[in-house]
Image: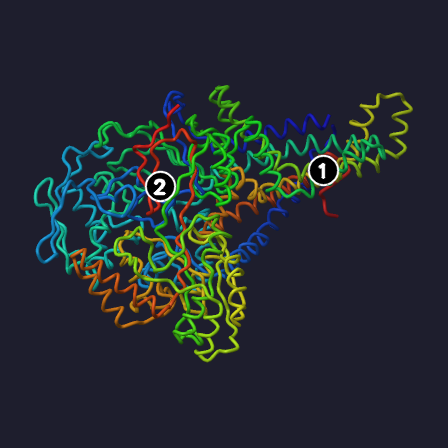
């Protein structure tokens, strides 16, 4: 008898508990079976859909579909091609850029895309006093354009509308990476009308010019983001899908199972080992994302014994990069020779890597005054990173080779946040680390990671604390130059200097295996980590 | 049934409830202090998530000031508690949205999953336990107890992945993730999808929601099921040897009636304790299941917040879970009196 009552009570309880969250919504019409839907599975949800406010890949992946930038990257590399701007020109002194905008483009809310919209967006990002400089910190703007309006290093002096479809950028000084920066997804043009309506809530209801727009109630947190086709997209005939759903599936194995079961159409963040399964399965296709990244071992050149370049060179000779790639990357990586990958222009092909040779390494170490080796702490990250699937295991692998030349290492590991903090403060003697490029400009690797300007703690980008004056003057010259071939030559020279001084052991450039159902056509993973999906379709 | 609670002990009951509620306050304050000190003791801070890896120290300082993170921890704590006492759970540092609003769908998702998992654990656990006690020391008993032993020891993530592999991938019978097929464009009303699909009166939705619940509910419910089965067995065994059971049998009552009415009812008290405790644990312990089945529940909400060092969300999320946990315990204690009228809440 009491069992029956118990059941009744339980049901009543559920109903009472449900009642307090009850709202009232009409049945949505979104469940259209005929709609061509593409489901993209990924590891985590977006943080915000206002591209100017975010730095994480999961947010930018989605905003890339909703918004467009003035210029964009080519399909395979980081060369810049037209997008919302059809063409552009640069003045003699390199300080003025004029962009000619595409005509007839409309935002999702029906308002016009024009020069005023571009000016509005840049002013909102750069000017802390702007009424809509709200909803976040505009971190990428400050990072790529040297702070905000009024700051010493700020690149942009003013952005003005010459006429309805022409925009002029005046710079405080010439900036080599300027055009590459403009192609980055955070600098996408948003509808001024929508931003003005509510600059904070804009990140939930983004309005751009992109191929897809966000569906009503389209964002279920930690679950899925639903985008629907923009019928007025400026590239006629696109997008090819009616609906694009970004589904968060945190566990890599579970996500891969969902792909195999056909519950999702494409995914990123695959365990490298699963690429074998993909190759064997006709229903699946492997897509390789070229790596705009580097994994490296940084020596803290401020601390003994790594203040001695010979010691650093010796350790460079004691690392078997191909072995690491075979063992931990399932062959999905290339050995790194320079501190930047070869998908970037300015890459120096003539640099020769230190040869993997234990005997020579020993000899060099003896010359440096350490015939019996030494003991050091070896920092390795615990969490997998896009460029380093298993830091501790890689460190253990290297540990054995170092032991052969008498260098005894003690591996020290922390969770990622802690790890970054400690390394940024320079607590390590040597540490595994890595970098994912932002704008496809060599400056974004060499200056950020190895210039003396970036040795400021607690958030040093140059965790070798390597301070080379000759390198510094080359990097600054390249930064201020606007002639691409001159810049290219300067960066090649920089790579020579770095190789000789050996502040790092450049390890690998990880290429990222991604997978899709084989009926998904047109997907080309871009080295920057996010690509437009307007030309992706499912052939059934 | 003549209930002591509602007849002679009404005043005692209220006093008891009030006393228990008051005891809740120091428990929750203590817990909030512990959570607060733990989350602030771990290095790293939310500015890294907001600004990315590449922020300058000036930017970091500015953001810390804006978020109030530059103040000493005790100031931050008192400010937070002041908000909580006025019913304000705070605002997420990352999404900048009120937590009391943000947490609702997650709470509903976890609650729905836990209820279904508990239902599964309850029905299977009790019956397996009964079966086992009824045929004590037979192969049936051993078989059932082996199942229970495996159930207790099996790691949830492994069970979940195996379920996925077998039912979602190999047999392709059940969906592999989430609460509902995103292609359906289902929009929740109450965020309890089972209820929503009934309110919509749409069989497609209902079927889809149920299909999505099966695997995670089994994964989550297996451990409690095994624990309930063991507890039911041992409790039943104790009762089965008592005189009144022998009398009942002698009276010629059917075996079913003897087992389910007389024995189970009298063996139910310790089982209920276990069920109550497990219910609380399910609510808080669903993180692994939620991760594997991409279930957007409160576990995943807090888990993400920990990664982002979103202090107010961690804080409030745990506070809400703890409150529910304590309330369920209270509810279970009250149920004792309802099931066993001999129990009184008066304190003499």
Q: Is residue B82 visible?
A: no
Q: Which mark is residue B228?
A: 1
The chain identifier of the residue carrying mark 1 reads B
Mark 2 burial class by Cα count in 10 Å: few <14, some 14-19, many 20+: many
Quadrant for the C terminus of chain A in the image = top left
Q: Is residue A19 left or right of residue A510?
A: right
Q: Is residue B116 left or right of residue B205?
A: right
Q: For this rendering, which residue is in front, A487 or B312?
A: A487
A458 up-or-down from B1: above or below: below
* Image position, residue A508 (x, y; %): 41, 56
* Image position, residue A195 (x, y; %): 25, 42
The chain identifier of the residue carrying mark 2 reads A
Res A234 quadrant in image: top left
Q: Secondary structure at mark 2?
A: loop
Mark 1 burial class by Cα count in 10 Å: few <14, some 14-19, many 20+: many
Mark toward the viewer: 1 or 2 = 2
Q: CA distance from mark 1 to mark 2?
A: 50 Å
* Image position, residue A265 (x, y; %): 42, 32
Q: Secondary structure at mark 1?
A: helix
Q: Is residue A235 visible?
A: yes
Residue at 14 percent of width and 35 percent of height: A103
Q: Which residue is mark 2?
A: A525
Quadrant for the N terminus of chain A in the image = top right
């Amino acid at each position: 008898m009491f069992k029956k009552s118990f059941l009744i009570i339980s049901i009543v309880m559920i109903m009472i508990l449900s009642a307090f969250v009850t709202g009232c919504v009409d049945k949505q019409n979104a469940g259209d079976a005929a709609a061509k839907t593409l489901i993209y599975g990924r590891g985590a949800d977006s943080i915000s859909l206002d591209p100017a406010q975010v730095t994480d890949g999961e947010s930018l992946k989605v905003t890339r579909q909703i918004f467009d930038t003035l210029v964009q990257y080519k399909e395979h590399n980081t060369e810049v091609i037209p997008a919302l701007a059809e063409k552009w020109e640069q003045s003699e002194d390199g300080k003025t850029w004029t962009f000619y905008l595409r005509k007839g483009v409309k935002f999702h809310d029906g308002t016009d895309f024009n020069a005023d919209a571009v000016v509005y967006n840049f002013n909102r990002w750069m000017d802390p006093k702007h009424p809509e400089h709200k909803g976040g910190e505009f971190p990428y703007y400050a990072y790529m354009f040297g702070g905000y309006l009024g700051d010493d290093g700020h690149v942009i002096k003013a952005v003005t509308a010459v006429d309805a479809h022409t925009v002029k950028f005046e710079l405080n000084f010439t900036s080599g990476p300027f055009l590459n920066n403009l192609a980055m997804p955070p600098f996408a043009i948003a509808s001024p009308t929508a931003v003005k309506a509510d600059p904070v809530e804009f990140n939930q209801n983004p309005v751009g010019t992109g191929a897809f727009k966000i569906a009503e109630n389209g964002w279920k947190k930690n679950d899925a983001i639903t985008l629907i086709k923009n019928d007025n997209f400026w590239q006629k005939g696109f997008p090819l899908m009616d609906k694009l759903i970004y589904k968060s599936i945190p566990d890599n194995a579970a996500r891969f199972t969902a792909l195999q079961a056909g519950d999702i159409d494409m995914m990123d963040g695959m365990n490298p080992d699963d690429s074998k399964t993909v190759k064997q399965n006709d229903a699946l296709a492997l897509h390789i994302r070229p790596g705009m990244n580097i994994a490296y071992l940084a020596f803290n050149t401020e601390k003994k014994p790594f203040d001695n370049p010979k010691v650093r060179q010796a350790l460079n000779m004691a690392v078997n990069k191909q072995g690491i790639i075979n063992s931990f990357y399932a062959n999905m990586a290339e050995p790194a020779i320079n501190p930047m990958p070869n998908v970037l222009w300015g890459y120096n092909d003539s640099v020769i890597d230190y040869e993997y040779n234990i005997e020579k390494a020993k000899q060099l170490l003896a010359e440096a005054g350490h015939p019996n080796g030494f003991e050091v702490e070896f920092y390795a990250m615990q969490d997998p990173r896009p460029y380093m699937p298993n830091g501790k295991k890689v460190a253990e692998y290297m540990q054995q080779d170092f032991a052969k030349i008498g260098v005894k290492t003690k591996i020290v590991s922390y969770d990622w946040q802690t790890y970054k903090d400690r390394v940024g403060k320079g607590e390590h003697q040597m540490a595994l680390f890595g970098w994912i490029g932002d704008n496809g400009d060599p400056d974004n690797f060499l200056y950020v990671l190895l210039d003396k300007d970036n040795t400021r703690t607690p958030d040093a980008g140059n965790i070798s604390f390597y301070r080379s004056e000759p390198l510094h003057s080359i990097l600054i010259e390249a930064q201020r130059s606007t002639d691409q071939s001159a810049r290219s030559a300067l960066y090649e020279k920089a790579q020579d200097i770095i190789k000789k001084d050996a502040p790092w052991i450049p390890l690998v450039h990880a290429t990222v295996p991604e997978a899709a159902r084989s009926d998904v056509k047109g997907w080309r993973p871009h080295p920057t980590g996010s690509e437009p999906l307007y030309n992706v379709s499912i052939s059934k | 049934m003549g209930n002591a609670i509602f007849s002679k002990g009404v005043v005692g009951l209220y006093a008891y409830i009030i006393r228990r509620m008051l005891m809740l306050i120091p428990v929750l304050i203590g817990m909030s202090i512990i959570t607060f000190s733990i989350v602030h003791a771990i290095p790293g801070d939310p500015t890294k998530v907001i600004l990315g890896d590449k922020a300058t120290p000036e930017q970091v300082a500015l953001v810390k000031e804006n978020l109030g993170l530059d103040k000493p921890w005790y100031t931050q704590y008192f400010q937070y508690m002041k908000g909580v006492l006025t019913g304000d759970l705070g605002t997420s540092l990352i999404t900048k949205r009120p937590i009391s609003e943000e947490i609702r769908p997650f709470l509903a998702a976890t609650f729905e999953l836990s209820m279904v998992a508990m239902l599964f654990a309850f029905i299977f656990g009790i019956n397996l336990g009964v079966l086992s006690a009824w045929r004590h020391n037979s192969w049936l008993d051993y078989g059932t107890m082996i199942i229970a032993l495996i159930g207790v020891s099996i790691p949830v993530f492994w069970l979940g992945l195996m379920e996925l592999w077998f039912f979602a991938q190999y047999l392709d019978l059940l969906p592999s993730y989430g609460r509902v097929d995103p292609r359906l464009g289902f929009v929740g009303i109450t965020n309890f999808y089972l209820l929503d699909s009934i309110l919509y009166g749409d069989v497609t939705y209902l079927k889809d929601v149920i299909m999505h619940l099966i695997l995670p509910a089994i994964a989550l419910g297996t451990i409690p099921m095994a624990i309930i089965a063991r507890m039911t067995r041992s409790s039943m065994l104790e009762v089965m040897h008592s005189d009144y059971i022998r009398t009942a049998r002698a009276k010629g009552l059917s075996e079913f009636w003897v087992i389910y009415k007389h024995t189970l009812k009298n063996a139910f008290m310790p089982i209920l304790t276990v069920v109550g405790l497990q219910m609380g644990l399910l609510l808080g312990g669903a993180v692994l299941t939620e991760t594997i089945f991409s279930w957007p529940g409160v576990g995943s909400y807090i888990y993400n917040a920990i990664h982002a060092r979103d202090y107010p969300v961690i804080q409030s999320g745990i506070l809400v879970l703890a409150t529910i946990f304590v309330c369920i315990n209270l509810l279970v204690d009250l149920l004792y009196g309802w099931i066993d009228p001999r129990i009184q809440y008066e304190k003499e």
